[in-house]
Amino acid sequence: MKIYHSIDLFQPVPNPVVSVGTFDGVHLGHQQIFAAMKEEALRIGGETVVVTFYPHPRLVIHPDSKNLKFINTQEKKYEIISRSQIDHLIIICFTREFSNLSSADFVKRYLVDRIKMHKLIVGYDHHLGKDRLGGYNELKGLGKIFGFELEEVPALMIEETAISSTKIRKSLMEGNVRLANHLLGYDYSISGKVVYGNRIGRTIGFPTANIELEDEYKLISAVGVYACKVDYQGKIFKGMGNIGYRPTIDRGDLTIEVNIFEFDEEIYGERIIIYFLERIRDEKKFENLSALREQLFIDRVKALEMLK
């Protein structure tokens, strides 16, 4: 996949099949759109072009909001789109000025004049342009004016629920990573550099790798203990992670840490990826470290069972 951090760098390709969106999570619904794009491009001898934005539009339109969190970092989003075998990814710088473009102006200036779009494929209830006024009916009219085809991919349903980024964010905030992973089509993860903690876990036989977040806007799943897998230098290990405030030890800042099973290497300063597969329990304050240690043995057994 070729990535363009400016649309000015994009060179014409044959019969571009285009989709536009923020694609937070790049979930199964988004992947269904990409599959439709690839099928159409193959049919007409064209190439697929995904257009997205950075910063995320909500960060520009609502800069004072302190609750803006996203399922993936930008880098992870690009990685998953690439895995979908899209040919071209164009990242448009989203500014205040850009946010004032009407859907007609955006379509003409960017998709028609610059990309020479042959066909636009959008998801169910997709909107673009200022105040998100460019819905399916308007886009259909613009297609007749500017000479491009339009296709709407219906909502992908799982268990009678339409897959959406909103649904996935809600599941993660409730700690239901099993459902979130089901809707994403892959495992929710958090990555970062391993930093020094208070090293108390090591004294009770459960050393943990504490990580420093790479992106302040990354959505963190609910506080609790989780069955996890850990990617360190391309190798996958089993483990159990904790998101929380370690109430038995202190009530400091939120920490993200993981006890990696069958692993005893010093990896401070190294980058790891923690994949969260299932929530084991709530975070709890224990009377002492001995009681915490007993619970951790129980958690380990449950984690290994979940990770089979």
Image (cartoon, rainbow, N blue to C red):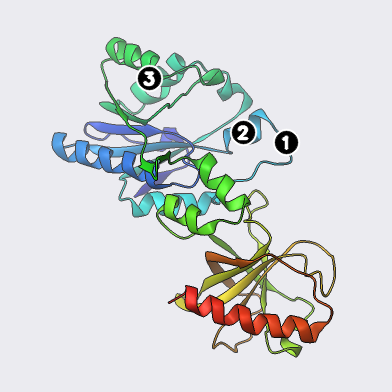
Q: Is 249 located above or below residue 184 in the figure?
A: below
Q: Is residue 152 above or below residue 169?
A: above
What residue type is disc 3 on?
Answer: Tyr
Horizontal side of residue 250 vs 88, given as left or right:
right
The residue pinned by badge 1 equals 65
User: Mark 1 falls on what kind of element?
Assistant: loop
Q: Is residue 243 left or right of residue 250?
A: left
Secondary structure of the residue carrying tag 2 is: helix
Residue occupying the point 53% across, 58% down: 177
Q: Which mark is residue 58?
A: 2
Q: Name the residue tied to disc 3.
A: 136
Q: Closest to the observer: 277 or 6?
A: 277
Q: Quadrant of residue 270?
A: bottom right
Q: Please provide percent x and percent y for residue 38.
A: 24, 42
Q: Are circles 2 and 1 on residues that touch, CB within 8 Å?
A: yes
- Cα separation, mark 3 vs mark 2, equals 22 Å
Look at label 1 and name its amino acid.
Ser
